[in-house]
Image: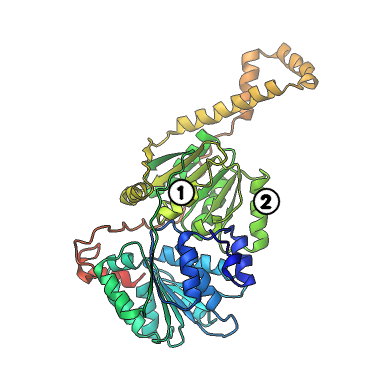
Amino acid sequence: MPTFYEMGLSHPVIQATTNMGFEEATPIQEMAIPAAMAGRDIIGQAQTGTGKTAAFGIPLVEKMNADSGRTQGIVICPTRELAVQVAEELNRIGQFKGVRALPIYGGQDINRQIRALKNRPQIIVGTPGRLMDHMQRKTIRLDQIEMVVLDEADEMLNMGFLEDIENILKEIPLERQTLLFSATMPKPIQNLANQFLKEPEFIKIKTKEVTVPNTEQYYYEVQEKQKFDVLCRLLDIQSPELAIIFGRTKRRVDELFEALNKRGYSAEGIHGDLTQTRRNSVLRHFKEGIIDILVATDVAARGLDISGVTHVYNFDIPQDPESYVHRIGRTGRIGRTGLAVTLVTPRELNHLRLIEQLTNRKMIRKPIPTLNEAIEGQQRLAVEKLMRAVEEGNLHPYKQLAEDLLEANDSVTLLSAALKLLTKETDTTPIKLTEEAPLRQKRTDNKRGYGSRREGPYGNKKHKQMQKRR
């Protein structure tokens, strides 16, 4: 595989990809980046897990003029989570070139978005419904857009966004460059490509079977409100040496690591809003063992050079199989067995099955641990600490003190007191986290009205209004 340096990219972009831990291009990047840099329209058929975000993100950033003071690129995504994830990755690719991407989605204050748009980001990453809202308000103008990316086009079709996408594309100048990425190519997507793309280059990548052989994979079915207590019990029982906990959003990461510290764990968080100095500081603390838990978003953890991670906890189930494989690939390295645990709400079980299907690996369901099991786990850890000290020796300075204590106390009482001091007390400090909405299940069949507004996942016209708010 070629390196990004060999692909003739600019120094600021190469510097960014190096910082992100990208070395060699993936097959879709190898094929898509040169074609996009040459100005070709592209249809990319690839599953998640192939590196497609960088495949369109690198040429998109390269073609932006950081000094133009106008928005020149737009990425259209099906969900707010993906819009945030793509914008974060684009900002990392563009960090040294001075190219900024702004996510625009429903559920966030529109006036805040309007203020952010006045700063003229070079790239907008948005969901169709919210983009249409801004177009109607004339707070987004598309008359100077030079490059358009449709990401997960088949998913947008499944969610009933086809008409919105067509309306958005009609407002963008004809002389634009258009890149369309989709895992599948149903007829309506082919028709969309025929209508809006000019002599596109078709790139198809076959997804290899993805396995992480050295990682045990478990899941626990829990209600959203139970998640944090279950996580704490698992940490007490499993006592990870170094653990990464993945949250879906930056807010989730901030709330999680603060809550963990309140309960006596040693944790710090990392996400896309951190300065590079702070980011480096957190990673140094984790690598040096000053903290033993790192809480992270997917994008923030991508490309991190971290070894020795024993446990990965998916506090929120990831958006797609690509993210799942990336997350659990952080553990079970260099011949060591790792453990990956996923907390799943009942409404997300179908999403879990999709990940199992596409990674060709079944996760083992485990019963929710009890508080007593958590206490026993900490007691077991205390015994291990004590026995390790015995094995290491060098106890001579303490022997006289021990003999004096034994004259006044029986040995069982004394040892019990020592174990009590070594045991981390199970903390039940009340913690309230902001609830995250469950992920929508991706439809994988094409039997029901592709592109039909009335036949979205809600089964009626109300779906249109609900999606408009995204």
Count of numbered tags: 2
> What is the distance, in whole Å, between disc 1 and disc 2 at their CAs?
23 Å
Asked which quadrant contains residue 192, the reply is bottom left
Front in this rendered view, residue 193 or 151: 193
- Nearest to N terminus: mark 1 or mark 2: 2
> Which residue carries the number 2 mark?
284
x and y, in percent, of residue 58 in the image: 52, 69
Q: Is residue 101 visible?
A: no
Observer-side mark, 1 or 2, equals: 2
Q: Which residue is mark 1?
A: 315
**Is residue 255 placed above or below 424 in the rendered structure?**
below
Q: Is residue 299 above or below residue 125?
A: above
The residue carrying pointer 2 sits among few (fewer than 14), some (14 to 19) or many (20 or more) residues within 10 Å by Cα, namely: some
Rendering coords of residue 56 (x, y %) = 47, 69
Which of the two residues, 224 or 14, is positioned nearer the viewer here?
14
Badge 1 crowding class, 10 Å Cα cut-off, few under 14, some 14 to 19, many 20 or more, is many
Report if residue 392 is visible in the image: yes
Q: What amino acid is found at the position of numbered circle 2 in the picture?
A: Arg
The kind of residue on which mark 1 rests is Phe
Mark 2 lies on a secondary structure that is helix
Residue 43 locus on image (x, y percent): 37, 70
**Residue under the image location 52 percent in, 65 percent down:** 89
Do tag 1 and tag 2 residues touch (Cβ < 8 Å)? Answer: no
Position of 45 with respect to 455 (left or right) is right
For residue 193, side relative to residue 421 (left or right): left
Residue drawn at x 30%, y 80% is: 195
